[in-house]
Amino acid sequence: MTSGAGSRIDSGSLEVTGADGPVAALERHYSVGQIAELWGWSETKVREVFRDEPGVLQSQLRALLRRKKRQNISLRVPESVLLRVHARMSIGD
């Protein structure tokens, strides 16, 4: 079954693929806290590494009742991005 330009939906396994492989929307997504716990890093370090990484979802959260000068940005990292960054950082080990 085909859906959209370059996409394929396999109805038998509900696998959705695009031109570059599995669609990130259906992957497991990790929070900054989850990655920090898995990798033994601080949340600050995780944010530094993943903030500008292609494929990472960013959501700006604004407090409606409290006035804050700084906006909170929530990051969600698809599993494929997590694995890509891990492989890139593991080169030479």
Image (spheres, rainbow, N blue to C red):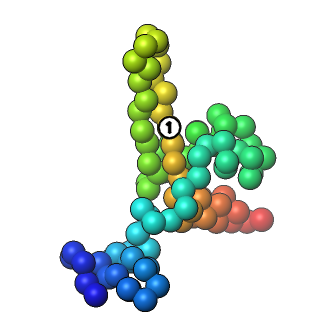
Horizontally, residue 10 falls left or right of residue 72, namely left
Q: Looking at the image, is 56 positioned above or below residue 87?
A: above
Quadrant in the picture for the N terminus: bottom left
Q: Residues within 10 Å of mark 1 (few under 14, many from 20)?
A: some
Horizontally, residue 17 falls left or right of residue 48, namely left
Residue 21 at least partly seen:
no
**Residue 76, image x, y percentages:** 51, 48
**Residue 33, image x, y percentages:** 66, 42
Horizontally, residue 63 falls left or right of residue 40, namely left
- Front position in the image: 74 or 20: 74
Residue indicated by mark 1: 74
- Front position in the image: 49 or 58: 58
The residue at the point 42 percent across, 62 percent down is: 25
Q: Residue furthest left?
A: 5
Q: Amino acid at mark 1?
A: Ser
**Residue 9, image x, y percentages:** 34, 81
Q: In what element is the residue under mark 1?
A: strand
Q: Using the rendered view, name the quadrant where residue 24 is placed.
A: bottom left
Horizontally, residue 35 falls left or right of residue 40, namely left
